[in-house]
Image (spheres, rainbow, N blue to C red):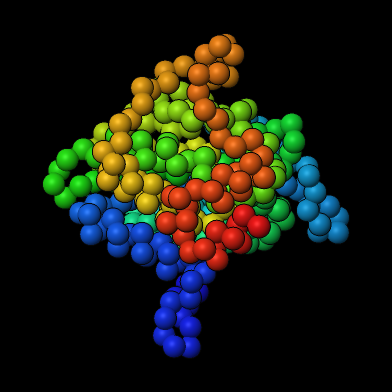
Amino acid sequence: MFCDIYKPDGTPYEKDTRYLLKQAVRAAKEKGLKVNIGPELEFYAFAKNEKGEATEMPIDQAGYMSVGPDDRGENLRRDICFALLDMGITPEASHHEQGPGQNEIDFHYGAPLSTADNTTTVKWAVRNLAETSGMHADFSPKPLRDQPGNGMHINLSARSSTGEDIMPQVIAGILSHIADMTAFLNTTPASYQRFGSYKAPRYISWSSENRSQLIRIPAAEGEYRRAELRSPDPICNPYIAYTLLIYAGLDGIRRCAELPASADINFYTASEDIRSQYKTLPATLADAKAAAKTSEFIVSSLPRIVVEYYTK
């Protein structure tokens, strides 16, 4: 059940993050912008022991884009996709991810509020269907220390009613505020163990070249032209995440922010001399909280009580 939360006097509850996203969408609409968002959710499927308790044993040892018989999550992903269709959510792709027992479910992009609702629903459906299949679905950012972490890549597009190409300014706005937003996109200490390895970004950069970038521009045209932010993980609050991305994009447009040069390099193989030229995401949750506390952008985008909750 999705609902809006109000105080007894009829005013919106300040910690209702669904309401915060509605406000962000309204602000974008007032500027003549249409925003669409599509997330990619990664999770591990673990076996259960004889007591029905979750273990840290992946259901398979398959790798990226593997198929059966190595990929033992095929049936689970199929059941998930059919269940989502029954619930009115259109799955766009599903496949085995890089880690053993790791899977990805992508669903069709849409308006930010309905997409945030769908993000919540998908995670609930995955957990329940995994349980009924005798498995345990784990969305945490780093379930296995020596394996890839779980990400929630967020695909975002923004179109102006005037037909002007404002995506460069939107991306520039996100890049300029991403360090301050990280405490809300990556909310646990384990979240920061992902950064810098297994396709999880560390450096604040963008490019269409490879998946070591913070923001990647996929090779797509028309309605699928978008920017893919690769740092968030699946346990973040999607309502807050999408709210902050919209406001960051709006700020980039307001300032006519200039997009920095693309980083057409692979950060995993680049020399230290090259990597040192780029700023990095916060290295720890404490660093991320400190950045958020002192950020004028965060304070202007979220209620004080929400900022305090995430940075205490």
Most foreground residue, 152 or 59 = 152
Q: Is residue 17 visible?
A: yes
72 left or right of 199 in image: right
160 left or right of 115 in image: left
Q: Quadrant of residue 174?
A: top left
Q: Is residue 69 above or below residue 184?
A: above
- How many labels sit on residues? 0
Q: Is residue 87 visible?
A: no
* Residue depicted at 36% across the width and 64% down the height: 23
Q: Position of residue 101 (x, y in %)?
A: 67, 40
Most foreground residue, 227 or 137 = 227
* Residue depicted at 74% across the width and 39% down the height: 144
Residue found farthest to the right: 50
Most foreground residue, 195 or 86 = 195
Most foreground residue, 223 or 271 = 271
* Residue depicted at 60% across the width and 37% down the height: 282
* Residue depicted at 56% across the width and 35% down the height: 281
Q: Position of residue 273 (x, y in %)?
A: 56, 11
Residue found farthest to the bottom: 8
Q: Is residue 74 above or below residue 236?
A: above
Q: Position of residue 185 (x, y in %)?
A: 54, 48
Q: Position of residue 287 (x, y in %)?
A: 63, 41
Q: Is residue 309 above or below residue 137?
A: below
Quarter of the picture holding the C terminus: bottom right
